[in-house]
Amino acid sequence: MKKLQCELCGSVDIMKIDDNVFQCQHCGCKYTQDEVKKILFGEVTFKAQDFEVVGGKLIKYNGESTEVVIPDNVTVIGTKAFENCSGITSVLIPNSVTQIERAFPGCTSIKEIVIPDSVTFIGFGCFDGCSALKEIVIPNSVTTLDGEVFRGCNSLQRVQLSSNLKRINLRTFNNCKSLEEIVIPEGVKEIDASAFEGCDKLKKITLPYSLELINRENDRSRSKSSWPTTLTYIDGNSKPFYDYFRLNENSDLLLSPSDGHKNYVADWYPQAVRLYAEQIRTQRRAMNRCESCGGRFKGIIIKECKKCGIRKTY
């Protein structure tokens, strides 16, 4: 497979800007998805005998090629279809495919995959252990990105997520140790608290206004954070910590008791999370809400929060 490089200026900084349009960030030259595939793979052919396909579902790849071209009659890439195919460096997925199950675990040499706009579902652990994968674009056609999809993708540096996702599931980016920055697209309403567990280099995360909940249900530990301690900046006008965090009278950051456990003083949370929570507290004060939980006040002279009972002192 060739490097994705602009044919006009030679830049490799090419981003997907629409469902079927890629654009060079250096000169502005635009390419369709089919043109991108042609740059990467040239004129493509496939060997039918290498693929075990039943009713449109690719069950198993039996070939030895390092650059795989999946046949056009495939609609679903099944679980373990390419499991531990460590020699494969690239995979061309046709526009006929609508679902990708846990298809590529242990494909340690895959460096780049072009996912077509026909795909709507990417299954649990789909790219688990694809340690050579450096970047990937999830097209806007994808509405479900299941848990642990990129677990152990140690080289993953750049991810562009679908704008039609509603949830970032458990351990989606578990141990993506090269990921430094990520933008969660507008429309996402929930992030699992363990989604970025083990992302030791993650420094910046941009959150959407649509975000409503950070779910702790799948946390491995109830008493410590799964958010990377390297996180130094949280951007975005959203309210993700309304249900996830509380602030006590001393401005200590607390975990919400909604999971049935006590409030833990969150001294071990990254400073960026604490700063973000302070922003929320300031917003609550400006709206005449309880700075601890966001609840409304009751009373005329002495005002107390209807939700948590803390007295208003400002």
Image (cartoon, rainbow, N blue to C red):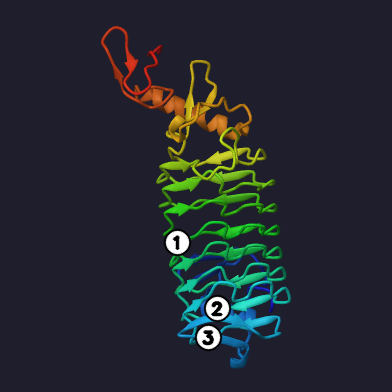
Instruction: Answer whether labels 2 and 1 touch (C-beta < 8 Å).
Output: no
Query: 307 and 221: which one is in front?
Result: 221
Q: Amino acid at mark 2?
A: Ile
Q: x, y percentage for residue 223?
A: 58, 32
* Residue lying at 50% horizontally and 74% vertically, measured from the top left: 116
Nearest the eye: 167 or 163 = 167
Locate the N terminus by quadrant: bottom right
Q: Which residue is mark 1?
A: 144
Per the model, the C-alpha gap separating discs 2 and 1 is 18 Å
**Residues under numbered marks 2 and 3 in contact, where contact means CB atoms less than 8 Å apart:** no
Amino acid carrying label 3: it is Val
* Of marks 2 and 1, the one in the foreground: 1
Given this view, does label 1 or label 3 mark the residue nearer the observer? Answer: 3
Q: Quadrant of the C terminus?
A: top left
State the residue position of label 3: 53
How many numbered discs? Answer: 3
Q: Label 1's element?
A: strand
